[in-house]
Image (cartoon, rainbow, N blue to C red):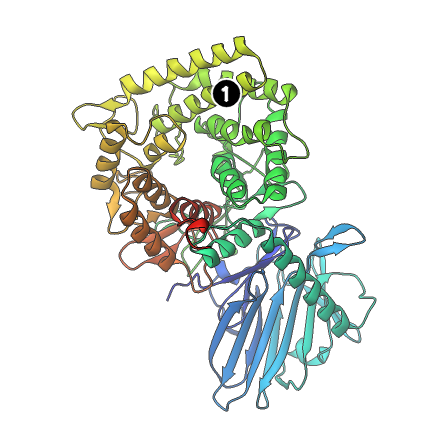
Amino acid sequence: MSHLNLGVIGNCAIAAMIDPQARLVWCCLPRFDGDPVFHALVDTDHGEAARGFWSIELDGYTHSEQRYVPNTAMLVTRLFAADGSAVEVRDFCPRFLMHGRSFRPQMIVRSILPLAGSPRIRVRIRPSFDYGQTAPTITRGSNHLRYVGPERTLRLTTDAPASYILSETPFLIERRTNLILGPDETLLEAVDHVARRFDEETESWWRDWTRRLALPLEWQDAVIRAAITLKLCTFEETGAIVAALTTSIPEAAATSRNWDYRYCWLRDALFVVRALNSMAEVETMELYLGYIANVVSDSADGHLQPVYGIALEKQLLERELTSLAGYRGQGPVRIGNQAHEHFQHDVYGNVILAAAQSFFDHRLLRPSSAVEFERLQRLGLQAHKVYATPDAGMWELRTRARVHTSSALMCWGACDRLARIARHLGREQEAADWLARSTEIRNAIECRAWNPRLGSFVDCFEGEDVEAGLLLMAEIGFLPARDPRFAGTVAQIERRLRRGTHLFRYAAADDFGEPTTAFNICTFWYIDALARLGRQQEARELFEGMLACRNPLGLLSEDVDPRNNELWGNFPQTYSMVGIINAAMRLSGRWEDVV
């Protein structure tokens, strides 16, 4: 069983993760990149002294069942005991419209309903602060407990006996019992009334949101769950979409490939926009394009970092914590990410290819115009300047710089799309200038990245190896799929990077040795390439294989061990969920063929 059998709840302001036994093991406050007040996911169990979790324990527990309320981000866990008693735990973070505004408080609602017998439960709520270093001071009122930390205080309001929760004493549960954890503010209504109303309104909001999605004929449930999870990774206040909701889940066992993914990587932009556009989820797409536009507007010299904070922070100082032992004891736990210092030239293409949507899409409230084009031109000039210079590449190699073909490819994409945008705006001279620059980069790639001995494009100029980013040549329009050079490149990638039904990013040793897990988005890129080559049945089989790798709730992390399909890497991974959406859209049969 994968240790990442977790459900995610959230409201696009905060998120939390809950294991199959209804134990809440991860939640950062006051936002995704904040202090994990519940952090058991990346710490070892310290027995009775353990902190960083919130459990609801059924006396005589034997097994559990877990599912999402259909078409929502609300999680239901049923716990069963040996004597036949059972309870249901409903978990969610409230979100709905209130007074004409989006209501998404820093709040978790947990409702416990007796299902059978005479269940007896114990509630243990043990937050901590400063990344596990500081235990809270606990004070109490008649129906609430306050967990006081150095910078924030959490209030648990409940209609269960507060004394039992404070002392962690087991008690019989005979009616619906509610636990509401949030800011240190008094609830103005009865706890049960608030919990029920928030439950009903949150379920209604998510169902309405899901109902508006455009879906493929096939794999609808998988796409809906991926879409909801992508939405949960959105920080709506700014429009940012984080790479994942966790830090330091290792890419593979015992490797120290532990990174903080609670930030916004510009590399994700193109594929996120394509997924949102394909589902007609225009509101989230426009919020995200707005975040990207803010990044671009702040780049006076045309330079872009690969990654920014969710409120446009540029400094993401990376450091290792000693207070947390790590996921399954496999540290270190890192916060911040050194990638903000890297030069990764593929970012220019990813941003411009994503932003191109805003010039052509008539649905947008704020379509882009000449002002935005001028800003993008700064990025394009930077792409043209750096395309043949060494960088860390899309895979963020920390100690080795080369002229990576995939980076040059995205620089070509930047110039190519600027030519298209200029033509769309009626600026013919600028269109010609950008076409000339894109042709220059194309000629360099075709001359310096093509290896005639291998019959394939290669990972770097004058190189001898391949990497999965080369699969994007057809995706972004550099080559038509029918070009024999694309087929030759796919063949070399298959030969060198495919492991069973999975694809590695690269096979060569890097800063941490040889990779041992497959990168899920690369497998999805491979599936897309196979479909473009007409190998439709093979692509469908591989896609079904990827769906089988999801956890029981339909979520994927960054990586999979091809030897046993165990999930590794930060979770849930935006890139992986986007991969599900884009592959389903590519492979599905047509609605008009059946209705």
Q: Residue furthest top?
A: 429
Q: Is residue 555 visible?
A: no
Toward the viewer: 549 or 544? 544
Indicate whether 481 appears above or below 96.
Answer: above
Instruction: Residue 236: give x, y in percent of width and height.
Output: 65, 45
Seen from the viewer's position, the closer of residues 322 and 31 is 31
Residue name at image x 62 percent, y 38 percent: 286
Task: Specify whether 375 is left or right of 543.
Answer: right
Query: How many C-alpha atoms fall within 10 Å of the one at disc 1: few (<14), some, or many (≥20)?
Result: many
Across and down, in percent, residue 61 comes to: 49, 82
The answer to whether 336 appears left or right of 236 in the picture is: left
* 467 relative to 321, above or below: above
Amino acid type at circle 1 is: Arg
In the structure shown, which secondary structural element does the residue marked by tag 1 occupy?
Answer: helix
Q: Quadrant of residue 73?
A: bottom right
Residue under label 1: 420
